[in-house]
Amino acid sequence: MDDAVVRGRYYDGKSAAVRTVTVRATPGELILRDAGDQSLVARWPIVELRVLGDSEHEAVPLLVRGGDAAARLLIEAPADRRALAADVPEIARLAVPRPRGAQRVLQFGASLAAALALVWFAVDRGAGAVAPLVPYGLQTRLGETVYRQLAGQRALCRGKEGMVALIGFANRLAVAADYDNAIQIRVVRGGPVNAFTLPGGIIVLYSDLIDRMSDGDELGGVLAHEIGHAVNYHPIQALARQYGVEQILKAVTGGYSDLGTLQSGGTLLLAMRNGRDFEREADATGVALLERLGLRADGMARFFEGLLKSEPADAASVAGIWSSHPPTQERIDVTRRPATGAPDFAEKDWQSIRAICR
């Protein structure tokens, strides 16, 4: 064994974070270290290694450790896969070259790898583990499909200055979260008083929600919550759990899909509802991102307080499009922050957003 050192992408299966690591084989295990500071990331015994899939059906087969299938390692460079397989014969299947004439497999290889992983890991657990691996272009196509079902016939508000302010703010938060893709914002004219996030980083706001806000910091808090859903891949996880991998793949590849033929937008909303864990994670992520950027983070709790005051019997259902929200008072207690930091929106931008439908 010549101890070749190769590079890969490591997913711990517990968060959406991706780490670039170096991988070195020793006689008994693989040593994974952070490519930046060389801190130890994981030690995988060679006897427990498994290769998921093969080069005929996946662009990059997954390497996992038996008993901890949520964590996975992707080694994208073929030369690196060959070097590692030469050191570790137990994973020789990792280096098998792709057969010729597999153009269709190449086109959808990454999505098929995600689908296979979802099946093998079980949908409920695997949706969270593999969601970051679903190609962004396919997530966006799916998000557009859902958007057309929900709000595709509704008029959009397009005030230029207001849209620039909203998109700029949303993408600042996304960058702070190390989310590699652009966030899109759609402002739908009218009600309900709501906002929601779709696959592909598409955030939909209703203008009645903006009208209800007392200031830009409340809007910033709600937007930060929706960014929390986007960067944690909650929408694609929810759809995968509800419909299964087969229907998701059909929807994004143009085949027949029950998802694409649903008659009721309400049915899609039910499918994509966020459970309490997702909502709590989105709240926590949103507040953390605002604080990381030195912005006011008290607006989220103040918005919830306004909802609780106006709808004391059913504030949780008014607070968002997805049911099963945590109790509103709980969310207020958890997200309450001091009124410190820079405003989420400059006063000029806030006024432009308020006038976005004019």
Image (cartoon, rainbow, N blue to C red):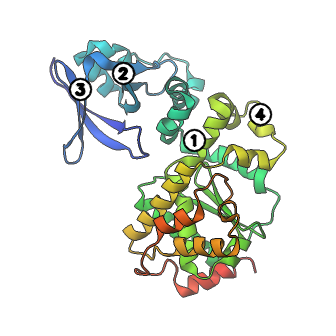
- Give the residue at mark 1: 237
> Left or right of 327: which side holds 176?
left
Residue tagged 2? 66
The quadrant in which the N terminus is found is top left
Question: Considering only vertical position in the picture, is 55 above or below 128?
Answer: above
Q: Distance between the residues labelled 3 and 1?
A: 30 Å
Q: Mark 2 or mark 1: which comes first in sequence? A: 2
Crowding near the residue tagged with mark 3, few <14, some 14–19, many ≥20 C-alpha atoms within 10 Å: many
What residue occupies the far front of the structure in this picture? Answer: 313
What SS does tag 4 mark? loop
Residue 187, label in figure: none
Residue drawn at 35 percent across, 37 percent down: 10
Q: Can residue 197 be seen in this view?
A: yes
Density class for disc 1 (Cα within 10 Å; few <14, some 14-19, many ≥20) is many
Badge 4 is on which residue?
A: 258
Marks 4/1: CA–CA distance:
17 Å
Please state the horizontal and vertical placement of residue 336, each as a whole percent of the image. 47, 71
Disc 1 marks a residue whose amino acid type is: Gln
Residues 277 and 128: in front is 277
For the residues carrying marks 2 and 4, which lies nearer the camera in this image? 2
Q: Residue drawn at (47%, 81%), measured in percent from left and top?
A: 343
Q: What secondary structure is marked by label 3?
A: strand
Mark 4 belongs to which amino acid?
A: Asp
- State the SS at label 1: helix
Q: Nearer the viewer, residue 218 or 166?
A: 218
Residue at the spot of label 3: 30
Q: Quadrant of the C terminus?
A: bottom right
Mark closer to the observer (3, 2) = 2
